[in-house]
Image (spheres, rainbow, N blue to C red):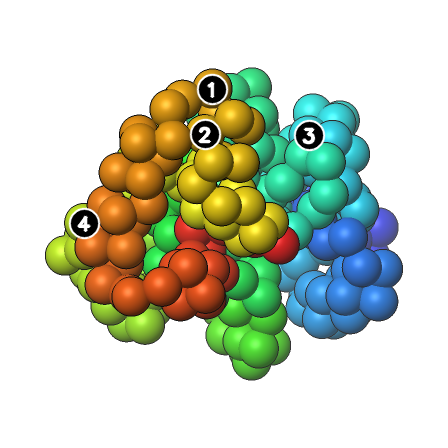
């Protein structure tokens, strides 16, 4: 077999990776790690959710590394859009968000697994290979966070809206006006949120909601 043939076979068999992150330095760092692997190649680099969806359509990567914080179209929405056009897409979330709600939403949207950006490069590479081979590697930490979430009472979509407005500093009267509900109903929602999150005041509501990924500022 000549060198040209060997090179062609390597390119055709390499794991094709799409990197998605809104920070160029992060994309460049991930691309460098990937490109150093003899069995991998970066076929695209996207800075936004919209760009990720379009590049996926053009490149059809084997594995997509997806951040969640991407601006107008977040990572979860981008995952849903990609899975709508390619149900077999293999997407790995790689993010700073460590909340149980972030993890749950990403996996529900169709991500295969979930990694934090402090993941060692060796673990990232191993995960890419595992996902490409059809495995669904989920770390014990992710499993533990999902188990914790399953054991907790869940906020309704309306209650999440109320939490977002509480985070903006609104009182019950303002929340009621913003949502088109009565002040008494807003008060009931706040009372239920305090009980579900097991906190005593609005400041703690915001703190817990941010930590768990229920809302983002």
Q: Is residue 153 visible?
A: yes
Q: Which residue appears at 54% of the width and 28% of the height?
A: 178
The first of marks 1 and 3 along the sequence is 3
Gap in angstroms between the C-alphas marked 4 and 1:
25 Å
Gap in angstroms between the C-alphas marked 2 and 1:
6 Å
Position of 196 with respect to 201 (left or right) is left
Q: How many marks?
A: 4
Asked if disc 4 and disc 1 are in contact, CB closer than 8 Å, the reply is no
Position of 117 with respect to 150 (left or right) is right
Label 3's element?
Answer: helix
Residue where numbered disc 4 is placed: 153
Q: Position of residue 128 (x, y in %)?
A: 52, 59
Residue where numbered disc 2 is placed: 176
Q: Position of residue 93 (x, y in %)?
A: 53, 53
Q: Which residue appears at 45% of the width and 65% of the height?
A: 203
Q: Nearer the viewer, mark 4 or mark 1?
A: 1
Asked if disc 2 and disc 1 are in contact, CB closer than 8 Å, the reply is yes
Gap in angstroms between the C-alphas marked 2 and 3:
37 Å
The first of marks 4 and 3 along the sequence is 3
Above or below for 145 versus 120: above
The first of marks 2 and 3 along the sequence is 3
Residue where numbered disc 1 is placed: 180
Q: Nearer the viewer, mark 2 or mark 3?
A: 2
Gap in angstroms between the C-alphas marked 4 and 3:
33 Å
Label 2's element?
Answer: helix
| Residue 53 disc label | 3
Position of 67 with respect to 109 (left or right) is right
């Amino acid at each position: 077999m000549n060198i040209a043939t060997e090179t062609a076979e390597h390119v055709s068999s390499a794991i094709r990776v799409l990197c998605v992150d809104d920070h160029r330095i992060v994309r460049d760092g991930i691309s460098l790690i990937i490109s150093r692997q003899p069995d991998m190649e970066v076929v695209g680099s996207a800075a936004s959710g919209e760009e990720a969806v379009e590049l996926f359509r053009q490149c059809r990567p084997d594995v997509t590394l997806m951040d969640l914080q991407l601006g107008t179209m977040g990572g979860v929405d981008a995952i849903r859009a990609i899975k709508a056009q390619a149900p077999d897409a293999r997407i790995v979330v790689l993010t700073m968000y460590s909340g149980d709600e972030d993890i749950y939403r990403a996996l529900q949207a169709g991500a295969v697994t979930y990694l934090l950006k402090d993941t060692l490069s060796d673990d990232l590479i191993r995960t890419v290979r595992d996902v490409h081979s059809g495995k669904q590697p989920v770390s014990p930490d992710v499993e533990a966070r999902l188990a914790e979430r399953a054991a907790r009472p869940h906020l309704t979509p309306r209650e999440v809206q109320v939490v977002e407005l509480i985070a903006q500093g609104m009182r019950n009267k303002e929340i009621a006006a913003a949502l088109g509900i009565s002040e008494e109903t807003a008060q009931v929602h706040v009372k239920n949120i305090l009980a579900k999150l097991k906190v005593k005041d609005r400041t703690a509501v915001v703190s817990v909601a941010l930590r768990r990924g229920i809302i983002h500022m």
